[in-house]
Image (cartoon, helix red, strand yellow):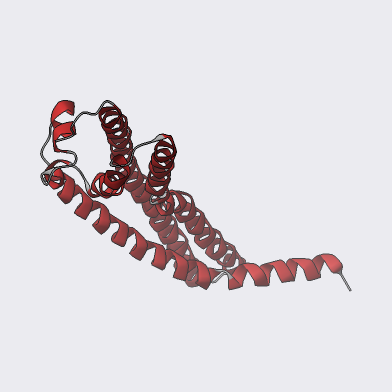
């Protein structure tokens, strides 16, 4: 038995069976991108309604009922968790506050992990969906079946375009979310430093 021919046949079968899973996954990724786009758009609307304030004004409104007018949801949630810790400030509580801050920052960055994956996975799946039809198309060409060759080439180029579109869209959405996250992280760190300092000095936050 020719081991080389057997291995070639096995790899060809494996490659051929990957086509439909790749097409299914690419279709699912298109739906995922639409969902993420809707989420980013909703967050943009939320942030567009926020009032732009200077740093001193931000500190004054940070723990007041007007917090929702100047802070995005992530910062609001952090400040609500921070408030009870500020009331019993000591060295142990400061460590808890630092842990809370790092945990929230980590959660913010993790929220964009799916988009980072799509940046890589989208073009990769598109490439798989391109090469498999190309191989069957070349086989059809050797047999003179031009109609099958044409259909396979159309499928190959279509999956390439969709895969690149997924990757490009995911990159744009990730870039936008990354800017928001960086902005939120700066605000959370700034407010933590100022509010902890004020409570240490016996100042007020309102």
Q: Residue at x 82, y 64 (%)?
A: 4
Image coords of residue 63 (percent x, y): 18, 41
Q: Nearer the viewer, residue 165 or 183?
A: 183
Image coords of residue 43 (percent x, y): 22, 51
Q: Is residue 143 visible?
A: no
Q: Residue at x 50, y 66 (%)?
A: 22
Q: Nearer the viewer, residue 17 or 49?
A: 49
Relative to 81, does residue 185 appear above or below in the rendering?
Answer: above
Q: Is residue 204 left or right of residue 27?
A: left
Q: Residue at x 43, y 64 (%)?
A: 26
Q: Is residue 179 left or right of residue 61?
A: right
Q: Please state the total of marks drawn on the protein image.
A: 0
| Quadrant that contains the N terminus | bottom right
Furthest residue to the right?
1
Q: Is residue 98 visible?
A: yes
Q: Residue at x 14, y 43 (%)?
A: 64
Q: Nearer the viewer, residue 72 or 83?
A: 83
Image coords of residue 100 (percent x, y): 40, 44
Relative to 142, does residue 108 appear above or below in the rendering?
Answer: above
Relative to 15, does residue 161 appear above or below in the rendering?
Answer: above
Q: Quadrant of residue 39?
A: bottom left
Q: Nearer the viewer, residue 30 or 14?
A: 30
Q: Quadrant of residue 202?
A: top left
| Quadrant that contains the C terminus | top left
Image coords of residue 132 (percent x, y): 56, 64
Relative to 45, does residue 14 appear above or below in the rendering?
Answer: below
Q: Is residue 36 left or right of residue 134?
A: left
């Amino acid at each position: 038995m020719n081991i080389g021919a057997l291995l070639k046949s096995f790899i060809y079968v494996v490659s051929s069976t990957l086509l439909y899973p790749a097409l299914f996954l690419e279709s699912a990724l298109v739906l995922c991108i639409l969902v993420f786009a809707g989420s980013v758009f909703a967050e943009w609307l939320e942030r567009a309604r926020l009032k732009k304030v200077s740093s001193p004004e931000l500190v004054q409104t940070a723990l007041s009922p007007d917090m929702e007018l100047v802070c995005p949801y992530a910062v609001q949630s952090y400040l609500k968790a921070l408030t009870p810790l500020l009331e019993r400030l000591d060295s142990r509580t400061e460590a808890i506050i630092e842990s809370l801050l790092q945990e929230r920052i980590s959660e913010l960055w993790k929220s964009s992990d799916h988009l980072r994956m799509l940046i890589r996975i989208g073009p990769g799946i598109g490439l798989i969906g391109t090469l498999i039809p190309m191989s069957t198309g070349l086989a059809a060409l050797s047999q003179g079946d031009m109609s099958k060759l044409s259909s396979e080439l159309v499928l190959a180029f279509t999956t390439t375009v969709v895969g690149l579109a997924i990757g490009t869209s995911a990159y744009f959405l990730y870039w936008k979310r990354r800017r928001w996250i960086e902005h939120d992280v700066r605000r959370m760190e700034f407010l933590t430093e100022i509010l902890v300092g004020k409570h240490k000095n016996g100042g007020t936050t309102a």
